[in-house]
Image (spheres, grey):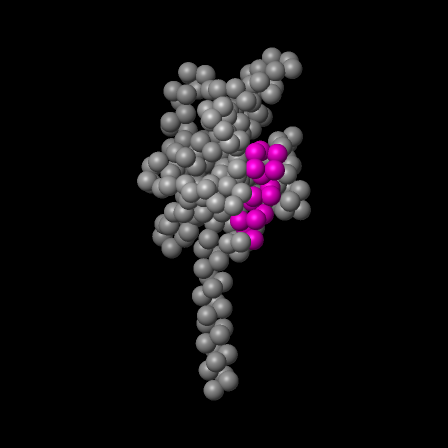
Amino acid sequence: MYRFLFKLFRKEKDIEEQGIMKKYLIVGLGNIGEKYENTRHNIGFKILDHFANKESLTFETQKLGDLATYKLKGRTFIFLKPNTYMNLSGKAILYWLTKEKIPLENLLVITDDLNLPFGSIRLKGKGSDGGHNGLKDTQDKLNTTKYNRFRFGISDTFSKGRQVDYVLGAWTQEESDKLKERLDKSVELIKSFVLAGINITMNTFNGK
């Protein structure tokens, strides 16, 4: 009898653990508010919104952010747009990782990157914050630099002393015209990360 109960408990535990391993937290970094909506710094929000539009998903405001859920091939994507503003992004990320019992390796943080040419995409499993306030707070709250990040290039074509204006500025018409294809590619990368894993996805998408 005890052996049967132990096996039953172990089976339920295995099912629970498998469920956790199949959940992924996909976080787009950005700032809330209409004035930030179409800025370069909000590319994380923009990519998640594009994914949601393609798959007819709806974001709902919950604790520390707006969330949407998507299921594909037995995996659950939990999309998060923190409403804490960029500098406190890590607070929302840690809360939802903990609440949903999602392992760190199933986290993907999407951010803008001044060091990459416009539209370039690069996936990495670890790295420094590179001076990015959202990544800096994420690193601080998670107490590690070893988390997956998807960096979207916004280039650095600004004059000396104008970095903040550039990052918080709107896309040019030329950039806007090219964004659709880049956003579609970003959606493909996210799906690949969840379904195929980080190594295959890096080999497939980095620099493309």
Q: Who's the residue at 48% across and 67% down the image?
A: 14
| Location of residue 35 with respect to 7 vertically, above or below | above
Which SS does the magenta portion mostly show? helix
Task: Measuring from the top left, give residue 178's x and y in whole percent.
Answer: 40, 22
**48 part of magenta stretch:** no
Compared across the picture, whether 77 is left or right of 151 comes to left
| Location of residue 106 with respect to 7 vertically, above or below | above
Q: Who's the residue at 49% across and 23% down the image?
A: 35
Q: Start and end of the magenta stretch?
A: 84-98
Front position in the image: 86 or 140 = 86
In the picture, the quarter occupied by the C terminus is top left
Task: Measuring from the top left, give residue 127's x and y in whole percent.
Answer: 62, 39
Q: Is residue 126 visible?
A: no
Front position in the image: 145 or 139 = 139
Q: Is residue 160 visible?
A: yes
Q: Who's the residue at 48% across and 45% down the image?
A: 62
Front position in the image: 13 or 146 = 13
Compared across the picture, whether 51 is left or right of 169 comes to left
Compared across the picture, whether 116 is left or right of 190 comes to right
